[in-house]
Amino acid sequence: VGPYVLVTPNETRRKQLQQSKLIAKKELDDLEQWKKEHRPGPITLVPQRLGGNESEAQVRQNQQMILMQYKYQKKLKREEYVKAKKAAEEAEILKKKAIQREKAERLEVKKRQEEMQRREMFLGDQKYKTNELLNRLDVGLPKSDSCQIANPGPESTAWKRSHAYKQALREDENRRLEEMRQEQQRKAELLEFKQKQEEETRTRTLKNEQRRVNNAFLDRLQNKTQPNSIYHPGYTG
């Protein structure tokens, strides 16, 4: 057995702790006794009329009216949401259609321009070949400035006919080109005017639809804010 230390108990400290426990227990007992003595008794009140001046049936009717009005307002909000969503979808569809229409019109203009270019190239090639043929016919014929003969022969007459034919071909070529240019210009102006009209029509249609939706919403909002709004003509109960 090893060494150990023996601590002598402090009797004074022990007595103080025991006395504190006794005092605390006595206070708790006194508190419980006080609660029992001061416990409230039964409450007895004289019956009396409570509430407002309305009867129970009238209160029930008012509650029913409030509930019906709430359901009606909820239905109106749902209808407004559906209409607004439908209007937005229709506007989006109109916008997509307008974009597709513009693409188709641009493609049509491009095709017409390409056709015009092909025609011009064809006419230019035809003009070149015609001139080449006429130049071949002119080979060996006397020129007008070098042949000053009082009585022109058959060669001079043939050269004049050839020169007149070439001149007529050139004038006809120029006339057809000018007509094609004017026709293309008229088509371009007509297409531009048509696009402007369609754009104005689309803008006017969208504005009218937006105005109609806004007016309907304001009318419903005004009917809500007015007294007895539950009895307006659209309500079926």
Image (cartoon, rainbow, N blue to C red):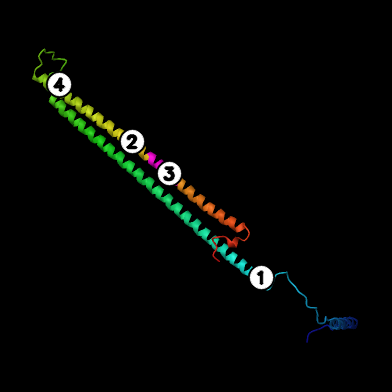
The answer to whether 190 is drawn above or below residue 154 in the figure is below
Under mark 2, the amino acid is Arg
Under mark 3, the amino acid is Glu
Q: Main secondary structure of the magenta part?
A: helix
Query: Dot 4 corresponds to which residue?
Result: 160
Circle 3 crowding by C-alpha within 10 Å: few under 14, some 14–19, many from 20: few
Q: How far apart are the two marked residues, 2 and 3, measured between alpha carbons?
A: 20 Å
Q: Earlier in the sequence, mark 2 or mark 3?
A: 2
The residue located at (22%, 27%) in the rendering is 170
Left or right, residue 69 beside residue 155: right
Under mark 1, the amino acid is Gln
The residue located at (29%, 40%) in the rendering is 114
Query: Dot 1 corresponds to which residue?
Result: 58
Q: Secondary structure at mark 3?
A: helix
Q: Earlier in the sequence, mark 1 or mark 2?
A: 1
Under mark 4, the amino acid is Lys
Looking at this view, name the residue that lies furthest to the right.
Answer: 12
Task: Give percent across and percent down for residue 111.
Answer: 30, 42
Which of labels 3 and 4 is toward the front? 3
